[in-house]
Amino acid sequence: MEPEPKDLIVLGAIKNGIKKFDKIKKTTQIDAEELNAILESLEKRGMISVQEKKGWLGPKVELVTTEKGDREVDERVHEMQEKWNQMSLLYKSGDKQKLKQYMDDNKSFLPTMMFFGIMDMMMFSMMFGMMGMMMSDYVPQESIPDGLEGDGMDGGADMSDGGFDFDIGF
């Protein structure tokens, strides 16, 4: 059973060593109620286990991935890498229609690709520029890294005066 993209993001965060609920919540930017439901689902499916450890201030709960969870993350990351490679090829070929269709078909995986660092963000923003679209048409605003909120057309540069402005420090 293929996990939903948010499930995969949470599973990946845990696999990468984020073991506490609050840190997972902060890293994944998923609200507490939804995160709790995702964690319960992952535990029921045998992807994670809950471990209680003794700490100085009393017992503490840590979440860890199981072998099944590790395999799932590795397989999905590999699949997303293949999807990104296909998107890159479509971009390099200059076929706007095929690229747009491919991105439409794989829209739900774009935030997950960002989370796992699979995509080249510069190329991704240039894809939107080529298609004359905004990144927020495909990716939720909270998932877009700082500095890339622009429309993707010019990489955020202000060229309203029609020319380039280079400051060489003299």
Image: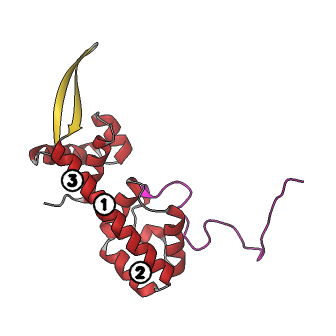
Work out whether mark 3 precedes mark 2 in sequence or the reverse, and give the earlier one: 3
Find the distance from the CA under tag 1 to the CA under tag 3: 10 Å
The type of residue carrying mark 1 is: His
Tag 3's secondary structure? Answer: helix
Q: Which residue is mark 3?
A: 72
Range of magenta residues: 142-170
Find the distance from the CA under tag 2 to the CA under tag 1: 20 Å
Q: Position of residue 72 (x, y in %)?
A: 21, 53
Q: Which residue is mark 1?
A: 78
Work out whether mark 1 precedes mark 3 in sequence or the reverse, and give the earlier one: 3
Find the distance from the CA under tag 3 to the CA under tag 2: 27 Å
Residue drawn at (77%, 71%) of the image: 164
Residue neighbourhood size for the residue with mark 3, other residues' Cα within 10 Å, grouped as few (<14), some (14–19), many (≥20): many
**Color style of the picture:** secondary structure
Q: Which residue is mark 2?
A: 99
Tag 2's secondary structure? Answer: helix
Residue drawn at (13%, 43%) of the image: 43
Residue neighbourhood size for the residue with mark 2, other residues' Cα within 10 Å, grouped as few (<14), some (14–19), many (≥20): many
Number of marks in picture: 3
Residue neighbourhood size for the residue with mark 1, other residues' Cα within 10 Å, grouped as few (<14), some (14–19), many (≥20): few
Whether residue 38 is visible here, answered yes or no, is no
Tag 1's secondary structure? Answer: helix
